[in-house]
Amino acid sequence: MTMQSNKVVQKYQEQYRPQFHFTPEEKWMNDPNGMVFFNDEYHLFYQHHPFGTTWGPMHWGHAVSKDLIHWDHLPIALFPDEHGAIFSGSAIVDWNNTSGFFDDQPGLVAIYTSADNYPDSDRPRQRQSLAYSKDNGRTWVKYEGNPVLSDVNITDYRDPKVFWHHDTNKWVMVLATEQSITIYTSLNLKNWEFASEFGNKAGSHEGVWECPDLFQLPIDNENSNHKWAMLVSIGDNPEFIEGSRTQYFIGQFDGTTFVNDNDDDTILWLDYGRDNYAGVTWSDSPDERRIYIGWMSNWRYANQVPTNEWRSAMTVPRELSLISTEEGVRLAQKPVSEINTIRKKTNIHKEFTIDSNNSFCFDLNNKLIEIEIELEQINSKKFDLLIEHSENEKTIISYDVRNSSLLVDRRNSGENSFSASFPAVQEAPLKMKNNKVKLQLFIDTSSIELFANDGKIAMTSLIFPSEIGKGLTLVSNGGSTNVSTLKITELESIWK
């Protein structure tokens, strides 16, 4: 944090309080909103209930950063008004004053969902509204013509993500509309026209569709070959054990219509852990990176997690890319390079073999840890990383060789009595790459983020141990495994 008081620093010493993930100063937070880069600042807005630690009347909280890692808290940006609470949305830089809100300088425009009920009814009503800022997002003016988009026939009608489409010289909005994504276009952000609809039969429909995003990326960093990626989050459905999570689609977009490259029954998960939801990406990133952040929780138990003064954190910001795989083009993700600003001492161990008769133990001398490990010549049935938080609490990361799967077992990670859905073994498919497996873990006070094989697989998991940072044990079951490299890096808190 670049400008912080002793009061804020003291607040960030609470039990389970993350030390290098963004959290609100106090009270409730959920979806990230309105992420935009403007005038050398990354803006992060978020769904916020400032009067309680469970979900309530939604406001937009606000923070800014120079490096995506250290954050300055700012006053609440958007408050509920005569049109309702302020649900999720996006923000853009109106460089050419298409909206008419600005004069000779560009400014920020927020596009969000106004949520209330229809008059004389308890039926929810969701409509899209605008606000604009001429002072780098410090103060906001609601557009007098709000709302700018509505549909009386659709109840779940929310979470607008807006971007400028250069080829057609129009603004594009992707909007979550019950079990599909509806695409609209506009010349001025105020008047919107229906363009197309996507997804009624594609992907997973285990819950209501929410928080879409749509963006273009090069494949394998080759600028001559691009695809479009669409993110869609899926709300909690008690019939399925995973709770809320996020899928994505790969395809083509011409400014009007998105065409899915895969069969409708193909489901691509952005994250195989239980705790990465409603994530979207920053607009106007200065170096053309596509940077993502997600809400590190799950609607199955978000209101019950055992924190007192605040609830919820965001994931580490991640750079997204498209890679070619045997299965087709897929999204990969890795922590942003700015994470290096909190790296401290690194211990490196190279070229050692573990077999069924021995295990290797390493002290973790810091509460905040990054672990990087590369396995090769894996002749075992299963390889385990036991992260020991305290004498009786541990999280087990396993690579199951026979089933080509990666598992995160948090059943004994710490406090879990708040929800029967929380103790779980989370699983992701993971094939070896050149007979190797690479894992990168970020361990904070109440979370583990795992990236495998250069970000092809991500698994995000909350944990609530009484202590953290005791030790690491490596175990090879049913044969030997060679560890070519093990790096254990101490990380520092951003709240100093």
Image: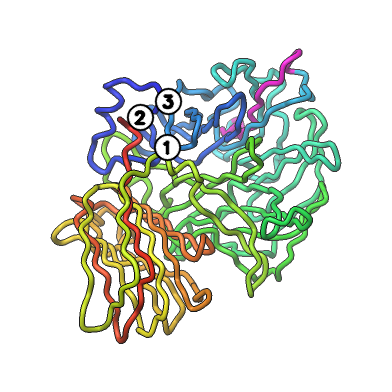
Q: Name the residue tied to disc 3.
A: 73
Label 1 packing within 10 angstroms: few (<14), some (14-19), many (20+): many
Q: Residue 130, how many percent across, how many down?
A: 66, 26
State the residue at coordinates (71%, 71%): 263
Q: Amino acid at mark 3?
A: His
Q: Residue furthest top?
A: 103
Residue 204, quarter of picture? bottom right
Near-viewer residue (469 or 279): 469
The answer to whether mark 2 and mark 3 are in CB contact below 8 A is yes
**Does residue 236 sit above or below 55 in this rendering?**
below
Circle 3 — which element?
strand
180 displayed left or right of 338 = right
- The answer for how far apart the CA atoms under marks 2 and 3 are is 8 Å
Label 3 packing within 10 angstroms: few (<14), some (14-19), many (20+): some
Q: Residue 4, how many percent across, how many down?
A: 35, 22
- The answer for how far apart the CA atoms under marks 3 and 1 are is 13 Å
| Residue 201 image label | none
The answer to whether mark 3 and mark 1 are in CB contact below 8 A is no
Residues drawn in magenta: 101-119
- The answer for how far apart the CA atoms under marks 1 and 2 are is 10 Å
Q: Earlier in the sequence, mark 3 or mark 1?
A: 1
